[in-house]
Image (tube, rainbow, N blue to C red):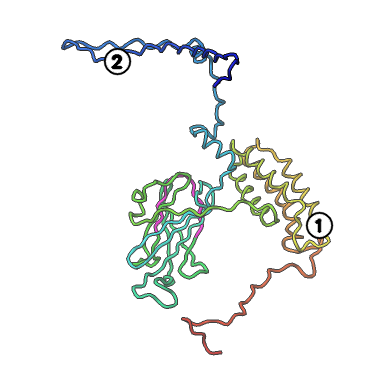
Amino acid sequence: MTAPGAAKVEAPPPSPEPEPAPAAPAEPARKRPVMAPGTQVVAPPPKAEPEESAAKAAAPVAAEPEAPAEFQGLSSVNVQAAVERGPVLLPAESRTSKRVGDLQFTFSVKPGRPIAGESVELVWKIQEILHIPDPFLGDRKPAAPAKLVVTISGPEKARTFEVHALEQPGTWGMHFTPRANGAYLVQIERADGKPGYKTQFDAFIGVAPPSDASARRGGVNDRAEELIPARAPDDRSLDGVMSELGKRWMALERAAGTPDAERALAQVQEQVAKVAGKAPGNAAGHAADFDQLAKLLADRTGALTAGANRTTTLDALQSVQADACMRCHTQFRFGLASSVRSWPQFEVSADPKRPAPAARDASPKRGRGPIAPRQ
C-alpha cells in the first residue's frame, strides 16, 4: 500500500533469462538394414583419433632392461622377489616314505639335492607297524637289528655296500660318492638273503625328481617327497664359520681345474676373512695368537690362483692345510701345544685338550610303561 501523495514506485523489470544453448541434434536411432539374401553389411569407417593421441601412440617406448642371466625366463615379479630374497639355500635333507607289509620305511638323502662328486649320506629308518598299539611305543616300534646291504645302480655300474646300524634303534646309514648325475635306484635288503627289510627307492643326483610320485621306480606307494630346509650359515660363532668354510673348501676341491674354480676360490676367500676375531673359548690370553693364525690363513688362501690345472690347485690347497690349518688345530682345536710360533717345532702341552665326557641324566630311569621301577 502506498501513502497518499507519495510517488508511485514501479518495480524494476525482470532481467531477461539467458536463452538455453541449442541442444545437440540427437543421433538417429540405428535401424538394422534390410539386406537382400547373400549380401553382407559393410562396417562403418572407424572414427578418426585426435592428433595428440595418434602422436602419443607413435612415440617410441623405452625398452625394459634385459634381466640378468640367472633370472631369464622369470616374470618381473619373480625377479624382484629373488633379488630381495638373496641366495637360495638348498634343502639339507630329502625324505621319502613307504609301507611294505608291516614295515614302514623312511629313506633320507643328505643333502637334499646332491650332485655328482659330492659325498651323499643315505639313512633308512625302519619301523614295525603294530596292530595292537603298545602303551609305551605307540603303534610302531623300531625294527629288529639285522645286517643289511644296499645295491645302488643307475648312470654308473651297480655297486653293493654294507650299511651300518646307527645309534638310534631301527636306523641304518652309509655314505657314497656318485660319479655321474642322474636317477639312481637304491635297493636295500638283508645280507643273508632272508625275506624282509627289502625295498627300493630312487635317489636323484644332479637332476630334479619327477613331480608325480607314481613315476618313481621305487613304487607307487611312495609318499610325496618331504624337503627339510637348510639353515643359513651362522657367522656369529667360530663353529658356524668353520662349518661353512669346510663346505666351501670341499667345493673348491671338486671344482679344481674347471671353469667353476674361480668362483669357488672367491667363496673360500670370502669365508676365511670371517675367522679373525672369533677366538674359541679355550684361547684365554691367546686371542692375539689366534688372530695371527687367522691372518696367515687369509694370506695363504689369498695367494691361491684358480687358473692352474687340477693337480697344481690340489697341491696348493694341501700345502695351506699342512701349514696354516694344522698350526691352528694343534693349538686351539686339540690343545696339543700352548704356542706354535716355532712351527713345525712345538712343545706338547702337559694337559692336552680331551673331549668332554657326555653328561649323565640325573633324572630317575623309567621302565617300560608309565610306572617307575623300584629303587
**Which kind of residue does numbered mark 2 sit on?**
Ala
Element type at mark 2: loop
Q: Quadrant of residue 242?
A: bottom right
Q: In the shown orientation, is residue 341 left or right of residue 367? A: right
The magenta region covers 174-187
Majority SS type along the magenta span:
strand
- Mark 2, residue position: 29
x and y percent of residue 13 in the render?
A: 52, 12
Q: Residues within 10 Å of mark 1 (few under 14, many from 20)?
A: some
x and y percent of residue 235 in the render?
A: 68, 52
Q: Nearer the viewer, residue 90 or 100?
A: 90
In magenta stretch: residue 260: no
Q: Residue furthest bottom?
A: 374
Q: Residues within 10 Å of mark 2 (few under 14, many from 20)?
A: few
Which quadrant of the figure contains the N terminus? top right
Question: Which residue is at a point 55% across and 30% down the rendered structure image?
Answer: 67
Q: In the shown orientation, is residue 140 left or right of residue 301? A: left
Element type at mark 1: helix
Q: Nearer the viewer, residue 79 or 338?
A: 79
The disc placed on residue 168 is none
Q: Nearer the viewer, residue 55 or 84?
A: 55
Question: Which residue is at a point 36% across and 48% down the rendered structure image?
Answer: 212
In magenta stretch: residue 186: yes
- Mark 1, residue position: 287
In this rendering, the answer to whether 28 lies above or below 253 is above
Which quadrant of the figure contains the C terminus? bottom right
x and y percent of residue 54 in the render?
A: 48, 12
Label 1 and label 2: CA atoms lie apart by 95 Å
In this rendering, the answer to whether 92 lies above or below 207 is below
Q: Between tags 1 and 2, which lies in front?
A: 2
